[in-house]
Image (tube, rainbow, N blue to C red):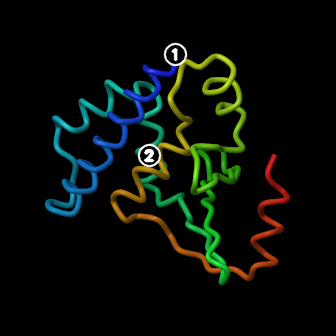
Amino acid sequence: MNCNTGSVLDSVTEQLLKEVEHSYKSTGQLTDELLTALQFVFQTTLSPALDLVDHRNITRISSPCGRVLYQVVGSSGTPYTCLSTSIYCSCPAYRYSVLMKQDHIMCKHTLAIRLAVAMDLCKELVVTNEELVKVITNMD
């Protein structure tokens, strides 16, 4: 994937997520047309990501200093930590499919976070600064 393709995909992704937010706030659901567009862009990652959102497996973790990260309990029950300022995830699929093979825009965990944030469906957990540091230092 070259730089221009990446920036176009980033723009398309951001626009789709804005439409997800608007649609979900307006009607409490996603239209078939929007789901089709999401499927076209995210392909095999979309369905498992929506499943994670449906099961409310995404937690927004924040601390008093204002730092935020997300934890997603994957389909296997394993919690994966994802940074709020990037599309990084600690899962093996991220390293393999997104970084090495570059055949996915993001893993199902990061897509689930983006969808859950757009639909306001994240659980909230406030921790101390020290607890947040422990979570970050235990990331792979």
Q: What is the number of the mark on residue 51?
A: 2
- Work out whether residue 137 or residue 15 is closer to the camera in this orientation and state it: 15
- Count the marks: how many? 2
Q: Residue at x 35, y 43 (%)?
A: 14
x and y percentages locating residue 36 in the rendered image? 24, 30
Mark found first going from the N terminus, 1 or 2: 1
Name the kind of residue labelled 2 in the image: Asp
Q: Look at the picture and state if 84 lies above or below 97.
A: below
Name the kind of residue labelled 1 in the image: Asn
x and y percentages locating residue 94 in the rendered image? 65, 33
* Element on which disc 2 rests: helix
* Element on which disc 1 rests: loop
Q: Residue at x 78, y 64 (%)?
A: 135
x and y percentages locating residue 113 in the rendered image? 49, 52
Q: Look at the picture and state if 42 lies above or below 123.
A: above
Q: What is the number of the mark on residue 2?
A: 1
